[in-house]
Image: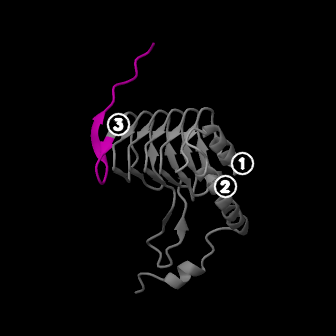
């Protein structure tokens, strides 16, 4: 029984020709973001939009934030993505309005099918719903939904969906609390 077949994995076509060309062009876009001064949020929003990202108003993305494939990313209004965060957007990544993603967080929309010896690439989407907060160095795994108002604590490893208003921490992340319902004004 063969557990891994690296030759089949390397031979598999993981990206279309168009996607490969976009990735080459994006390497220039990444430089334009990385070299921008700290307060140039508008510039970074423009560059991300130029490369196909859907970016809402008043989004703050820092120069050291990395987007793997920005055309697979949607950022709602008033999103903040911290320094050195990594958005590994092989698949679709949706980050809803009012979400804060802290520095060095890793949002991962890519994995492999480990049941197949060729380990084919999979691109399951990641969804982070409105007003959620992703803590420092947290990892959000492929196919995960972090629901509205949830908090993922620093360095948590999220491998299961996080329900609305839940607070999770640890590796693997587990519930440590629930936020109160927002007050009606």
From the top left corner, tell me how far across and down residue 177 is, in percent: 28, 35
Between discs 1 and 2, the one toward the N terminus = 2
From the top left corner, tell me how far across and down residue 147 is, in percent: 44, 39
| Image quadrant where residue 167 sits | top left
- On screen, residue 24 above or below 83: below
- The local secondary structure at tag 2 comes to helix
Q: Residue at x 64, y 38 (%)?
A: 42
Q: How many numbered dots are placed on residues in this image?
A: 3
Q: Which mark is residue 166?
A: 3
- The local secondary structure at tag 1 comes to helix
Q: Please provide the residue range marked out in magenta.
A: 168-185
- Whether label 3 touches label 1, CB < 8 Å: no
**10 Å neighbourhood of mark 3: few (<14), some, or many (≥20)?**
many
Quarter of the picture containing the C terminus is top left
> Given the current orientation, which residue lies at the most extreme left position?
176
From the top left corner, tell me how far across and down residue 124 is, in percent: 53, 57
Give the overall secondary structure of the magenta segment: loop
- Whether label 1 touches label 2, CB < 8 Å: yes
- Whether label 2 touches label 3, CB < 8 Å: no
Q: Residue at x 29, y 54 (%)?
A: 171
Residue under numbered circle 1: 50
Q: Residue at x 60, y 32 (%)?
A: 58
Residue under numbered circle 2: 29
Q: Residue at x 60, y 48 (%)?
A: 73
Please tell me whether mark 3 or mark 1 is closer to you in this view: 1
- The question of residue 98 being in magenta is answered with no
Left/right placement of residue 120 relative to residue 181 reads: right
**10 Å neighbourhood of mark 1: few (<14), some, or many (≥20)?**
some
- On screen, residue 152 above or below 149: below
């Amino acid at each position: 029984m063969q557990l891994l077949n690296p030759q089949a994995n390397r031979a598999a076509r993981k990206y279309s020709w168009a996607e490969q060309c976009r990735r080459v062009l994006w390497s220039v876009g990444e430089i334009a973001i990385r070299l921008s001064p700290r307060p140039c949020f508008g510039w970074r929003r423009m560059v991300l939009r130029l490369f196909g990202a859907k970016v809402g108003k008043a989004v703050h993305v820092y120069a050291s934030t990395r987007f793997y494939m920005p055309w697979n990313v949607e950022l709602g209004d008033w999103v903040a993505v911290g320094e050195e965060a990594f958005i590994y957007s092989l698949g679709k990544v949706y980050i809803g309005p009012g979400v804060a993603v802290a520095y060095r967080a890793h949002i991962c929309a890519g994995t492999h099918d480990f049941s197949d010896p060729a380990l084919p690439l999979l691109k399951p989407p990641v969804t982070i719903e409105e007003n959620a907060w992703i803590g420092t160095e947290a990892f959000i795994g492929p196919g995960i939904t972090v629901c509205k108002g949830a908090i993922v604590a620093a360095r948590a490893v999220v491998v299961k969906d996080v329900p609305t208003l839940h607070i999770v921490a640890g590796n693997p992340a587990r519930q440590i609390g629930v936020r109160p319902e927002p007050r009606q004004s």
